[in-house]
Image: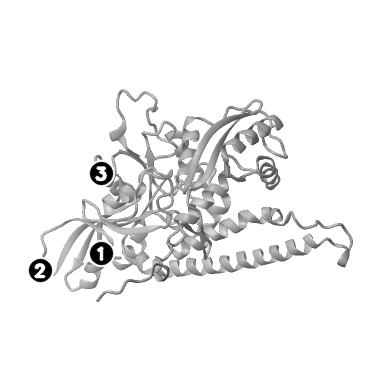
């Protein structure tokens, strides 16, 4: 018989787990208990200094909004504010700050994102006057990278960049403590002791991260040695963020790298082998996307990852030609490459004009594309539909052949090891009818393997010419 359980003794339903957001700060994981995204206001300053043109435009305005949408935020407003003279204390004028404070108080804004680089003092004063947390463009990009970093290497690099960024802002964490009054020993204020202790811990953590990243760099170099010993040239994909690098990478390699219409969809370098139409194999590398005003600390932290670009035999510069500001974006990419020490004079650059399927005669707002900088070749493609991919692969082959030399070499049949090396490291263009004891081959040799080739087949060459 079923017994009726008294109402007071009925089993209680377990309380639902608190909803929240999980996020990282370096190697630490935090859980933020909040049921709604942060109420955020975006500010895009239009800087109009005397004798200078405005550095802001529609594309910059929309790009900043895309950056903010890349993380979990509730964007309440996005406004442009003209700035003729930047104030050392608050960046904006007094009247502008007062107007923003009233508007944000009515809208219950919790976070303000400013599309510029703020000094620590400007950030502190704006937070005090606006009554909300304030982050500049650099801090926002660091937040996005912190959320997107997936591998251990990426997490360490983002944490290092974040700590370097916080160095000059450490004093803001201790504004409730007294500042140093002067003198020695106990005459110093208590704030000085706490700040110095935190700075020492920060320096120790930065030094530890730099050692760990250096160890990763050495490990990556060791892993690269076997790849360098085989005849696989390295082709690196670079470009502005959201230009379609991961999409073309997946198309060429059959990989499944995350490719979305968002900024900084992927941060970690991925390499795969690709078979070219004329039989040559290459290694293609997908790298992190660049952006205007990319934090220098972030570039420094990601140098280990971007080594694939520095060591590349050919660089494919992906350009989103459907973006009205594609020419300025291309110049930003070339500036970052120059900072890394990559020069088009030493490394051939192929411009891949992506998203041509979005260009229509009615779209007059997009300027006609033209090459930026020194370019080896141009391929008009669509990574989404596959249009123009054969032309891109052909351009890669032509760029790799630049500086190559063709030889006719007479190899005896009993030199099987040398014949195998030739097929592995060179491109066999033709071969004569094999004789009883030897065969004559017509081959193309890239600059990377010419020295070893001449050493192996010295005395067996019948003809040589430059390509």
Separation (CA) of disc 1 from disc 3? 25 Å
The answer to whether residue 64 is left or right of residue 394 is right
Helix, strand or loop under label 1:
helix
Helix, strand or loop under label 3:
helix
Name the residue at 24% across, 41% down.
385
> Which residue bears the numbered disc 1?
424
The answer to whether residue 40 is left or right of residue 384 is right
Name the residue at 31% across, 23% down.
362
The numbered mark, 3 or 2, whose residue comes first in the sequence reads 3
> Which residue bears the numbered disc 3?
389
> Which of 290 and 274 lies nearest the eye of the viewer?
290
The numbered mark, 1 or 3, whose residue comes first in the sequence reads 3
Helix, strand or loop under label 2:
loop
> Which of 297 and 44 lies nearest the eye of the viewer?
44
Res. 174 in view: yes
Q: Which mark is residue 436?
A: 2
């Amino acid at each position: 018989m079923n017994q009726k359980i008294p109402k007071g003794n009925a089993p209680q339903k377990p309380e639902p787990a608190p909803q929240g957001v999980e996020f990282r700060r370096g190697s630490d994981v935090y859980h933020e208990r909040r049921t709604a995204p942060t109420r955020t206001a975006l500010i895009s300053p239009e800087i109009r200094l005397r004798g200078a043109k405005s550095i802001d435009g529609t594309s910059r305005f929309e790009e900043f909004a895309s950056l903010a949408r890349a993380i979990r935020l509730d964007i309440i407003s996005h406004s442009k504010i003209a700035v003729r003279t930047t104030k050392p204390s608050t960046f904006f004028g007094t009247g502008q700050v007062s107007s923003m404070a009233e508007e944000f108080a009515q809208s219950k804004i919790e976070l303000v994102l400013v599309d510029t680089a703020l000094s620590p003092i400007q950030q502190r004063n704006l937070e005090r006057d606006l009554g909300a947390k304030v982050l500049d463009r650099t801090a926002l990009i660091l937040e996005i990278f912190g959320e997107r970093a997936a591998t251990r290497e990426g997490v360490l690099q983002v944490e290092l960049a974040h700590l370097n960024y916080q160095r000059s802002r450490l004093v803001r964490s201790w504004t409730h403590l007294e500042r140093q009054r002067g003198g020695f020993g106990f005459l110093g204020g208590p704030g000085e002791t706490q700040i110095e202790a935190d700075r020492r811990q920060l320096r120790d953590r930065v030094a530890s991260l730099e050692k760990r990243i250096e160890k990763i760099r050495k490990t990556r170099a060791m892993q690269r040695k076997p790849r360098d010993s085989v005849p696989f040239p390295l082709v690196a994909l670079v470009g502005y963020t959201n230009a379609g690098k991961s999409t073309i990478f997946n198309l060429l390699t059959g990989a499944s790298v995350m490719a979305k219409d968002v900024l900084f969809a992927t941060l970690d370098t991925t390499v795969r082998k690709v078979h070219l139409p004329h039989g040559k194999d290459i290694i293609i590398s997908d790298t992190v996307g660049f952006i205007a005003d990319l934090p220098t600390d972030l570039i420094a932290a990601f140098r280990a990852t971007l080594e694939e670009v520095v060591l590349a035999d050919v660089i494919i510069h992906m350009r989103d030609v459907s973006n009205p500001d594609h020419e300025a974006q291309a110049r930003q990419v070339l500036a970052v490459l120059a900072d890394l020490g990559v020069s088009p004079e030493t490394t051939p650059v192929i411009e891949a004009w992506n998203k041509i399927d979005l260009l229509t005669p009615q779209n007059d707002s997009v300027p006609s594309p033209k090459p930026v900088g020194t370019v080896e070749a141009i391929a008009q493609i669509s990574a989404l539909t596959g249009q123009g991919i054969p032309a891109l692969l052909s351009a890669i082959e032509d760029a790799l052949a630049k500086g190559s030399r063709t030889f006719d070499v007479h190899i005896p049949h009993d030199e099987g090891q040398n014949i195998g090396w030739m097929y592995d490291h060179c491109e066999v263009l033709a071969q004569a009818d094999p004789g009883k004891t030897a065969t004559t081959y017509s081959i193309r040799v890239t600059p990377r393997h010419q020295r070893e080739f001449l050493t192996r087949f010295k005395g067996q060459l019948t003809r040589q010419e430059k390509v």
